Structure formats: structure tokens, C-alpha cells
Image (cartoon, grey):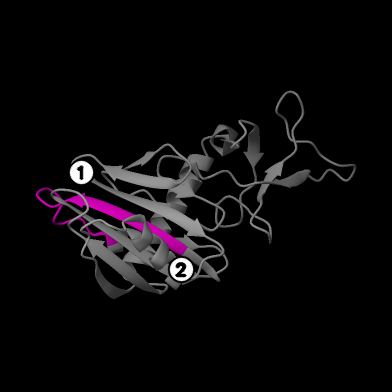
Amino acid sequence: MKKRVFAFLMAILTIFTLSSCGKKNDKVTSNSDETYLIKRDKEGFAKVDDYGQLVVFETDDEGEIKKNDNGDEITKAVSFPYYISNEKIVECSDFYLPIPEGWELLTGQMIKLSNSENKADISFTLRTTSSIDDCISQIKDLFEGWNVEWEEKTVTLEFAEARCLTSTKIFDSHTKSYYVFTVNEKTYVINTSSNNKISEDVDFVSIINTMCFRNK
């Protein structure tokens, strides 16, 4: 718990530091390549509404924030991009986490972190309709006919009990694991991969435990 609190405080400090550098740090690009100026909540994170939509300011042609007749800044809600990041922390509509030292965020349609030195990676996926059992079945179906030899266990995280599938048979010299858990009535699948000869000390659970969920 102490590690998670420390990571959370460091994430807040990072966002406040970067936000103080100017509004350019608050510009994000949507999945359809539109640029928005985001509004932050009192903790410094991207503000979302009750439906998980990203709250942004309405701006004029010069990029200045529009105001109504009462002088209040005008906002609107738009679809949250796959994720947003300031290179120190990555956020999506459901959670945010600090990017660990030595890891980098890869571009794509999901949050994926990679450590080139340890030849390891971790991907975060959200499933909104599938149960944990359904996700476990879907994972096993992906490798039907393979010599997988799954090891299945329960892992206690800071915020949930996770079902974990692990195999050393999918790729040569690599261990692949799937952590599946439910938070706020949504099921998450976290996919990890590491080179057995290089990354024996990679602590994926510690990285997962730095996830801070909105509304929890």
C-alpha cells in the first residue's frame, strides 16, 4: 500500500510540475486527429464526466478559451482518446498510472509499456462486457491447439483479486502472463511478457498496483 501511495503522490507532483509549464501540456489529440485543450480536476488529472467522457475547453480560432456572458469558461465533453500521456504518466478514461523508470509508452490503440533493457512489456486492456470467466476462456481459446500448459493462480492486488494465467511454452525463453480482474464493474485484462534469461527480476505486480482508478 505504501508503494502505491508513493507512486500516486509522485504522479500528482509530476502533473502539477508539467501543467505549470503552460497550457501546451494540456493539448491532446483525439483518435480522429482533432486537438483539444483539456480541463483538469482538482488533483491535476484530466477531468472526465460521469460517463467517462473527456472534459475539454471550447476554444476560438486563436486557441483561446471561450467564455459565456457571465465570464465562465465554456467546456464540452468528447470521447476520451485511447489514452493521453505527458511522458511521465499515462491516463485513460478509467485509470491513470505513472510510467515506471526505464519503461517507455509505445504508440497504439492500448496502453502498452516496454522495457528494452529487460526485454519485457506490459499491456492494459479494458473489457466492459465480459466477465472474468469469459475473459479467461477467450484467452485459452486464442491458444487452442498450442502446447501452452497454463499455470493458473489467484493474485492479490491492492484493489482486487486477479486470476492469473502463466505459460513458459508460448514463446521460446519467454514467460507470458494474463492478469484478469474486475474494478468498478469493469473487467480488465493485463498482458505481460518477459525474457526468462534477462528479466527474472521484473515485478509486474508492482506496476499493476500503481494503477489508480477513477471513482474508486
Q: Is mark 1 on a helix, strand or loop?
A: loop
Between 185 and 66, the one lying in front of the other is: 185
| Chain-order first, disc 2 or disc 1 | 1
Asked if residue 129 lies left or right of residue 51, the reply is left
Residue depicted at 86% across the width and 42% down the height: 68
x, y percentage for residue 92? Answer: 52, 51
Amino acid at the residue labelled 2: Asp
x, y percentage for residue 98? Answer: 39, 52
Density class for disc 1 (Cα within 10 Å; few <14, some 14-19, many ≥20) is some
Residue depicted at 45% across the width and 62% down the height: 188
In the rendered view, tell whether residue 90 sits above or below residue 36.
Answer: below
Q: Name the mark on residue 18.
A: none
- In the orientation shown, which residue stands out farthest toward the top? 62
Image quadrant in which you'd find residue 67: top right
Location of mark 1 (residue): 119
Between 99 and 113, the one lying in front of the other is: 113
Residue 142 seen anywhere in this rendered image of the structure: yes
Magenta segment: 188-204
x, y percentage for residue 29? Answer: 58, 34
Q: Is mark 2 on a helix, strand or loop?
A: helix
CA–CA distance between discs 2 and 1?
30 Å
In the rendered view, tell whether residue 7 sits above or below residue 151.
Answer: above
- Circle 2 or circle 1, nearest the eye: 2
In the rendered view, tell whether residue 198 sits above or below residue 107.
Answer: below
Is 132 in the magenta? no
Tell me the quadrant of the picture where the N terminus can be found: bottom left
Residue depicted at 68% across the width and 57% down the height: 49
Location of mark 2 (residue): 134
Image quadrant in which you'd find residue 87: top left
Density class for disc 2 (Cα within 10 Å; few <14, some 14-19, many ≥20) is few
